[in-house]
Amino acid sequence: MRLTVRKTILRAGLLALGLVPVLAPAATAATPSPSASSASGSPAPVTTAGTSFLTATTLAPGQDAAVPASTGDYLYWAFAASEGQTDTVRVTVTLPPAAQRHSPQTWSVELFDGLRRRQSCTAGPQNATAATADDSVALSCTLRQIRSWAEPWSGDPLPGTYYVRLSLTDVDAQDLGLAAQVQLHITAKGGADNAQPEGGEFKAPLVPPVNAGSTAAPAPTLTAPAPATPKSHWYSGLFSGWNTRWFWTLGGAALAALAGVGGYTLTRHPRGHRHHHPAPPAPAPRYDSYAGRS
Amino acid sequence: MTTTRRRLPAGPLGLLAALAITAGALLSGLPAYADEPTSPPAPTTTEGGSTEAPRVDLILDVSGSMGATDIEGKSRISVAQRSIDEVIDALPPEAQFGVRTLGATYPVSDKTDGCTDTKVLFPVGTTDKVEAKTAIATLRPTGWTPIGLALRGAAQDLGTGQTTRRIVLITDGEDDCSPPDPCDVARELAAQGTHLVVDTLGLSHDGKIDQQLQCIANATGGTFTDIHTQVQLTNRVEQLVNRAADTYQVTPAKTAGTDQCATAPLLAPGVYSDREKFSEHRIYRVPVKPGQELRASVSVSLDRAVARDYGVLLQATDQGGQELVRGSDAGSGRTDVASTGLRWSAPAVTASPSTLTTSAAAASAAASPAVCLVVSNSFAPQPGTQADPGLPLELTVAVAAASPAPDGPAAGLGRGWVLLLVLTGAGLLTGLLFGWIARWRIAVWREN
C-alpha cells in the first residue's frame, strides 16, 4: 500500500518535471489507490452486520451496507482507513411502522479504532432522536484525519481497522425487536500526501487479532515474535526517506538554475547593444554609460 | 566580447543537460530507499475451527397458546411452520441444523409432565430437507412452556467444541415452569464457556414475555426480535442461520486473570475471554521485548441489568506496579459492551556504554520484559442483579514493531510553491548580479 502510494507520488513528481518518458515503464506498475477503486465501480452492498467487535462485517473501500435489523440490535461493521484519509460514515435507518412504536427512540453511531478505543466525531449528528411519527432517521460521523504516526500514549486515529457500531441508545422496552432497515455509506477523502506528521511512519497498522490466543505457561520462554531490524548503512542517517519534498526541492533548484541563466542572459543582451556596436564613429557615449554604471 | 556571446547559448543547454543527468541518476537510484511493503499480519484461522461446521439448533414453542390466530390472520404455529420450511429450503450446505420442541406432547391439564416436555424433533446434523419439513408439519399446539429446560437440552444437542453455536428460540409464551428461570439458565450456559449464543424471537407482543426473551438474548450476546409478520420471521431466522455460518469460527480462547501481576497468566497475541465481577480487578501478563509495541484492548459486555452510568479501565503496569499507560472509556445508557484499548512501546535498549545511566524502568524492562494488564470496571449492579458469574470480558493482545518518533521533515528539503518562488527569485537575482559583474568587468577590460 505504502509502496503503491509512493509510486503514485513518484509518477506525479516525474510528470511535473517532464521526465516521465525516462521512467515510464517503472511507473506503469503502480496500482490504483483505494480512493480510485470506488470510482471504477463500487462492489455490491453487504447485507450482513456483525453483532460484536469480533464478528464485525468487513466493508471493502466504497462498499455500502443494507441490512434488515431489529430495533435494539447492536450492529458492527469494520473498514480500513489509511493515513491522510478523513472518513465519514453516514447511516440511514428506516424505522418500524409508526403504529408499532410507542415512544421516541434515540439512535447513535459510534466509531472505534482497531484497539476498540472510542474515536471522536468532528462533524455530523452522531445521535438522533426519532419521534413516533418519523419514518426514518439519518446519522453521520466524520473521523479526524488519520495520522501517519502518533505517540503510543495518545488516542489519535492511526491507519488500520475502524469499527462502526450502530445502536439504539434510548428506547422504550416495548419498542424493542421491531423490524428496521439500515443503510450505511462510508466516504473517504484525502490521501497519504497530506498525512500528519510529515515523515511519520506507522510500522504496523492497527489491525486487531481475531485468532484465539494461547496462554503461555508462566516461564521465561517468550512467544512474541521479534521485529526485523532494518539494515543500517553509512548513509542511513543522511536520508530520512523518500517523500515529495525531494521533487519540490529538485524542481526549485532546476527553476533557480534556469532563472539564473536567464537573468545572466538578460544582462548580456542590453537592448540595442548589437545595433550600436558596429558604429565606430561614436564609441565614447557608450563607454561613458558603462563607466557611469560601474 | 564575441567569445562571451558565443558561449552563452551553450551555457543554458549544458546546464540543463547536467541537471537532467543528475535528476535521472537521482531518480533511478532513489526507489532503492523506498521501504519494502509492510504486509499487515494476516488474520489466521482458529486452530481446529476449520474442520467444524456451523451448528444451529432451533427451539420451537408448541405450547397451547401457539394456536392463537393473531399474525396477519393466521395462527402463530402455522406462521412459524411455514417460515421454518422456507429456512430449511435455504439452509447453507455446510450448516448443521436441528430442531427441538417444547410443549409438544403433554396437554395443558398435565403440569408435572408438561414442565419436562421438551424433546428433539430432529437432531443437529446434516438436514434431510423433506424429512425435516414433514416433521415440522405434524406439530400441533399442545402443552406447557419449559423454556429453561429446553435451553439446557439444546445446549446438549449442540455439544461442546471450539466454535460458536447458536440457539434460535421461537416462542410466544412466558416460561410457566420456572424454576429454573430461563434467564438464569442462559447466563449459566454462557458462563460454561461453551460459546453459546441464544437469539430469541417473540410471537406475542406482551411486555413481560418480551422482557424475559430480551434477558435471555442479552445474557448470551444474542438478539431479540418481536415478530409481526410472516416475512419478518422468515427473513430473521434466515439471517440468524447465515450469521452463524459467517461468524461461528471467531471464538476467543478462555483464560483466567488473577489478582496479582506475579501470578498472572502470560498471554501470546490473540483473543481471550474471561469473566469479571463488579469492581473486580483482573490481571494478565504479556511479554514485550525492547523495540516492540504492545497493543491491547478490552471489552466488558453487559449481560444483565446495571446502573445507568458505567466505565471500563485498562491499565498497563510494569512488574513493580508502576503505571505505564492507561485506556479508559465511560458512558451511560443502553449499550452492549464498554471497551477501551491502549498502546505502549517498550523503550529500545541501546548497547553503547555511555547509556549506563538509563532509567531504571528501561533496565527493569530489559531484565523481565513482561507488561501487566489490569482490567477493572465501574459497573454497578441494580438491586436484585446477580453478581456471579462475572460479566463477560474479551481481551485482545497484539505485539507489533514499535514506531519511533519521526525525525521531522526530510533532511533540509523543502516543499510548496513559496519555496519554488523563493528559489527562482534567488536564481534570477544571482544571474542578474553575475551578468552585471561580467559586463562591468568587460567594460573595465575594454577601457584598459
Image (tube, grey):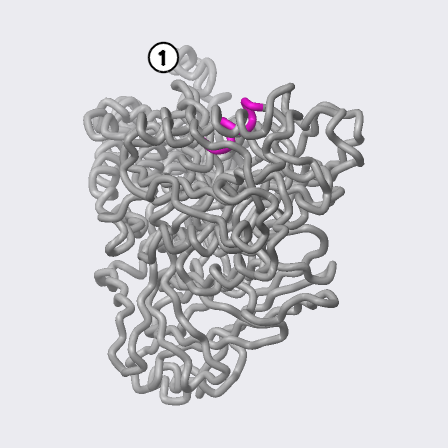
Can the viewer see residue A62 in this picture? no
Magenta span includes B231: yes
Q: Is residue A165 above or below residue B261?
A: above
Mark 1: secondary structure: loop
Q: Quadrant of the C terminus of chain B?
A: top left
**Residue B387, quarter of the rendered image:** bottom right
Question: Which percent across, then down, holds residue A264?
Answer: 40, 30
Residue shown at the point (64%, 29%) measured from the top left? B68
Q: Nearer the viewer, residue A226 or B127?
A: B127
* Label 1: few (<14), some (14–19) or many (≥20) C-alpha neighbours in 10 Å: few
Q: Amino acid at mark 1?
A: Pro
Where, quadrant-wise, is the N terminus of chain B in this rendering? Answer: top left
The one of B282 and A185 positioned closer to us in this rendering: B282
Q: Is residue B103 left or right of residue A268?
A: right
In this rendering, does residue B60 appear at all? yes
The quarter of the picture where residue B430 lies is top left
Report x, y in % for residue B198.
50, 48
Vertical position of residue B383 compared to residue A147: above or below: below
- Residue topped by disc 1: A278
Viewed as shown, does residue B225 lie left or right of B242? right
Q: Is residue B239 above or below residue B338?
A: above
Q: Residue at x 62, y 36 (%)?
A: B65
Pick whichever, B437 or A44, lies toward us: A44
Residue under the image location 32 percent in, 54 percent down: A239
- Residue A56 pos. (x, y %): 46, 43
What is the span of residues highlighted in magenta in the rendered image? B230-238
Q: Verify whether residue B301 appears in magenta.
A: no
Q: Main secondary structure of the magenta part?
A: helix
- Badge 1: chain ID: A
